[in-house]
Amino acid sequence: MNLDQVFVALSDPSRRALLQRLAYGPATTGQLAELLPVSRPAVSQHLKVLQDAGLVETEQRGRHRWHRVVAAPLTAVATWATDLTSRSSS
């Protein structure tokens, strides 16, 4: 996992909104597209960035692509931030 890639993915408000929705459970591309005031292709591009960073996994089921959050990269960010905070508090 590339922590820099995770931070880049998290830097965009639209991608953070997608992750916040996916925290409640898997969703289709169409369901996610309803959340944002952008085109469906733009949502697909955001999902690709999240996938490349390892934050989202996608599974094709019939005609739909289902997306879900992957916790490991978020845990790595939390660990990094906690470690940084504990070092600066000393």
Image (tube, rainbow, N blue to C red):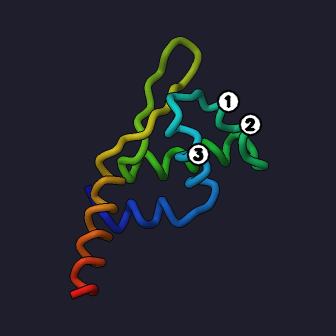
User: Of the residues under marks 2 and 3, which one precedes in the sequence?
Assistant: 3
Front position in the image: 76 or 89:
89
Amino acid marked by disc 1: Gly
Q: Quadrant of the N terminus?
A: bottom left
Separation of disc 2 and disc 3 at Cα?
A: 10 Å
Separation of disc 3 and disc 1 at Cα?
A: 12 Å
Front position in the image: 54 or 89:
89
- Crowd band around label 2 with a 10 angstrom C-alpha radius: few (<14), some (14–19), many (20+): few
Across and down, in percent, residue 37 comes to 78, 49
Identify the residue position indicated by label 3 in the image.
18
Front position in the image: 85 or 49:
85
Front position in the image: 68 or 25:
25
Identify the residue position indicated by label 2 in the image.
34
Quadrant location of residue 7?
bottom left
Residue 8 left/right relative to 28: left
Residue at 33 percent of width and 62 percent of height: 77
Across and down, in percent, residue 9 comes to 47, 59
Across and down, in percent, residue 20 comes to 56, 46
Is there a contact, CB below 8 Å, between mark 1 and mark 2?
yes
Q: Compared to 28, does 38 lie above or below? A: below
Amino acid marked by disc 3: Leu
- Label 3 element class: helix
- Label 1 element class: helix
Identify the residue position indicated by label 1 in the image.
30
